[in-house]
């Protein structure tokens, strides 16, 4: 049986509460064993609702979250000395939103398979993700998730393009 429990926030008492709250995406990164998966799958209903919004809303929001992620991940790294603490999931959130923006053209029905493949690649960290992860501070934390998200997003968009061409 899987045991669920909640971890202490990264940098609690060392960084302002808002920083660890954002870094853990409102605490989802503290729930073991779900962490990144919980943060990403919690976004799915919001993305479905975002279909009615102008096309640039999600990517702009994602870039803002990415920039915030660089800041909070750097602050926590500096204060704790822990690089890419697994409780920090804002990197998966921002990367997933950027990747989801790429597959909007392909159709929102691809979000769940996209999320599953993205989270798998995020976990196994194949090259070049493992190389990007070495970039110092919050930049490395954020970029090592952006690489697989963009790669999978482009793969899904291209696959959907060819699927649509054959369906005509």
Image (cartoon, rainbow, N blue to C red):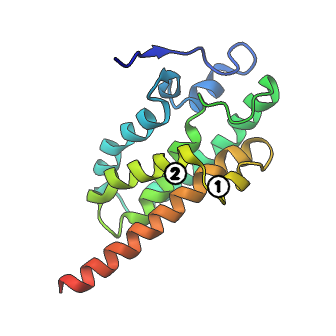
User: Residue at the spot x=38%, y=55% of the render?
Assistant: 114
The residue tagged 2 is: 121
**Image point (68%, 43%), residue name:** 141
**In the picture provided, is 59 more to the left or to the right than 71?**
left
Residue at (59% x, 28% y) in the render: 87
The residue shown at (75%, 37%) is 74
Query: Is any atom of residue 143 visible in this view?
Result: yes
Residue 51, position as x, y percentages in the image: 30, 57
Residue 58, compared with residue 10, is above or below; it is below
Q: Is residue 164 left or right of residue 126?
A: left
Question: Looking at the picture, how far across and down is residue 10, in whole percent?
Answer: 66, 21
Position of residue 166 measured from the top left corner of the image (x, y, whole percent): 23, 85
- Which sits in the foreground, 162 or 60? 162
The residue identified by callout 1 is 129
- Is residue 150 found left or right of 161 in the rendered image? right
Mark 1 secondary-structure assignment: helix
Q: The C terminus appears in which quarter of the rendering? A: bottom left
Which of disc 1 and disc 2 is earlier in sequence?
2
Describe the element under mark 2 as helix, strand or loop.
helix
Tell me, yes or no, whether the two marked residues, 2 and 1, touch with CB atoms within 8 Å: yes
Question: On the rendered image, what quadrant is the N terminus found in?
Answer: top left
- Mark 1 Cα shell of 10 Å, populated few (<14), some (14-19), many (≥20): some
Residue 57 makes an appearance in the image: no
Q: Total number of numbered labels? A: 2
- Asked if residue 72 is positioned above or below residue 118 in the image, the reply reads above
Could you say where residue 82 lies in the image, as x and y percent from the top left? 75, 28
Compared to residue 40, the image places residue 97 above or below, namely below
């Amino acid at each position: 049986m899987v045991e669920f429990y909640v971890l202490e926030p990264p940098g609690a008492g060392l960084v302002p509460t808002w920083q660890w709250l954002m870094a853990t995406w409102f605490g989802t990164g503290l729930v073991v064993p779900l962490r990144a998966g919980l943060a990403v799958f919690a976004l799915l209903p919001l993305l479905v609702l975002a279909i009615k919004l102008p096309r640039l809303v999600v990517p702009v929001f994602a870039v803002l979250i990415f920039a915030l992620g660089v800041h909070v991940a750097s602050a926590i790294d500096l204060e704790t000395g822990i690089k890419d603490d697994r409780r920090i999931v804002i990197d998966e959130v921002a990367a997933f939103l950027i990747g989801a923006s790429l597959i909007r053209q392909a159709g929102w029905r691809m979000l769940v398979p996209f999320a599953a493949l993205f989270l798998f690649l995020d976990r196994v960290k194949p090259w070049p993700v493992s190389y990007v992860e070495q970039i110092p501070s919050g930049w490395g934390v954020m970029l090592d998730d952006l690489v697989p998200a963009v790669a999978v997003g482009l793969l899904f968009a291209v696959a959907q393009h060819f699927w649509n061409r054959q369906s005509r």
